[in-house]
Amino acid sequence: MLTFGIMFAFIFCLHAQYYKIIMHSNKKVITFYNGGGENEWTINPSLKPDIFRHYSETETFRKFRFISDIDSLEFNVEINKPIYFSIIYNGDIAHTVIEFINYIPNTLSDEQKLYALSLFWSEAKYNFAFIEKLHFDLDSLYIAYIPKISATKNDYEFYNQMQIFVGHFKDGHTNVNFNYSGKYTDYIDVTARYFGDNLYIIRTREDIEKYLPIGSKILEINGMTTNDYIKQHVEPYIESDFEPTVKALSAAKLFSSNLSSNLLTVKYITPDDKIMVKTLPRDGKKTTGNFIGYSPKRWEKPIEINWIENDIAVLGFHTFVDFGGKLVPFFEKLKDTLYHAKGIIIDLRQNGGGSTDVAEHLLKYLIKDTDFLTYAWQTRINDGVKKANGNWIEEYEDYYKDRAYRTVMPDTIYISDSIKRFNVPITILISTMTVSAAEDFLIMLYERNDRPKFIGRPSFGSTGSPLVIWDWPDENGFARICARRVLFPYSLKPFTEGIMPDILVEYTFDEFMSGKDKDIEIAVKELEKQ
């Protein structure tokens, strides 16, 4: 008993010695700097310890600074030498460790990796909603990836291979996620966009702009033509096979996070016709500076109303996420001013989806009938006996070939007499960023003769109900498999690619960079015609 007591005291003293550096805070969220810009850190005493992990392939030390409302700490942290300190918050102690490392952890066993691959394959084999769309044999793909997954040397490589595996499904609601991916990667502070078939620089950091100016056209990447490089190294990760979406996402992902050793050497022609070759720095996390070029519009509220010429209202419905049931009441408080409009433009260009119930609520104000149909949908079904007999009884062949579906017909939504419709001309703006529940909204409208015109670019082309596999293969990751195939309500055609606008609006580079909103301009002209 005495020996146990001495040992316990020794461990306690050692533990206390590790965390003898202390800072105080009255707030749960503090500020930290780690060689780059300002970031936030949430104090979490329940984690023992709370590990603050940063990774670099090239640095040997980095300065970390933590600032609370009443205190601050600063550390010069050497690579692979952890720093221990404690934050006292609200009477509790959060033991914290700064891990600045130059290696990627390999915490997953071979068994975990192969089980994760097998679990995804088996769930997709029986539940993936678009099984007949696959242009490959799923079993053969699974067999081909067993040695690839086994050969991965760390957790990042495992998730990277799984992303390529899942990329074959080309579905926006079917993907894998690694919570710590951003810890081991960095990005290039450059943004590009396609105009026609050419890729142009539209935004960059001030120091990069000195040699890679806005308006430069990218000709080659790592010695390959731009299109060949993207097809070989970017498109395998793109969760779509709808061409407009593939192009938009490829441009967005080209300079996004990757390992610092994944260098991009670009050959480009500047606006003054100089041909240049530069290797771009992957240092977006640790470098600060001003940006030049295109600045994306950020919505401040989930629903906004702006008034433009001729008493036309632009209803920016930027999300259908219901925020715990708060979005519909928020819309109800705003909507009355719309009855004074002579025309309404509904802007869904940034609407990434959320709750279809919110979409249905908005539809009640647009549709003149007393009711409307929701979408129909299908999901895969498996019946062991029918599958057993399906190799010789034609009636059950779909079960034998894993392509049997259960179809659920559309519901009828009745519109209450208390709903006062927007009885003015309406147009709807859409883009590649119109996704999921926002596309459900379009699907429920699309086949109606009395619907508003859609203006802009094709929508993303993905909706459905994802089957989520949590703790896949451990608490640091999860996977999703789309299990619902949505059908148009009247024709019952499957929704397999983005909604095409009635009026396609494309921009030249100069129009885009000028901030000109051609979508709004064309929508106004359409409303004036009506």
Image: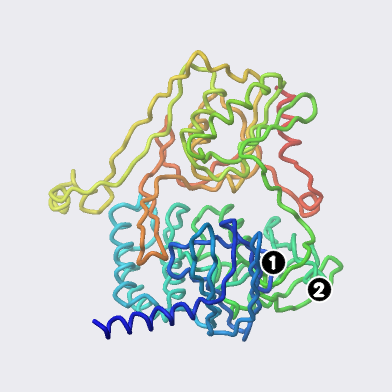
Residue 478, horizontal then vertical, whole percent: 40, 60
Distance from Cα at disc 1 to Cα at disc 2:
23 Å
Residue 37 is labelled as: 1
Mark sitting earlier along the chain (1/2): 1
Q: CB of mark 1 within 8 Å of CB of mark 2?
A: no
- Residue 269, position in %: x, y? 78, 70
**Figure label count:** 2
Residue 280 position in % (x across, y down): 70, 75
Front position in the image: 215 or 492: 215
Which of 180 and 201 lies nearest the eye of the viewer?
180
Q: Name the residue under label 2.
A: 211
In x, y percent, where is residue 143? Answer: 31, 72
Q: Which residue is drawn at 79% across and 53% down?
A: 513
As drawn, 51 above or below 397: below
Q: In which quarter of the image is residue 36?
A: bottom right
For mark 1, does the 10 Å Cα neighbourhood hold few (<14), some (14 to 19), or many (20 or more) residues? few
Q: Is residue 291 visible?
A: yes
Quarter of the picture containing the C terminus is top right
Above or below for 264 versus 305: below
Q: Residue furthest right?
A: 272
Q: In this view, does 27 lie above or below 506?
A: below
Q: Which amino acid does label 2 sit on?
A: Tyr
- Which quadrant: the N terminus? bottom left
For disc 2, the neighbor class at 10 Å (few under 14, some 14 to 19, many from 20) is few
Give the residue at x 65% y 65%. 71
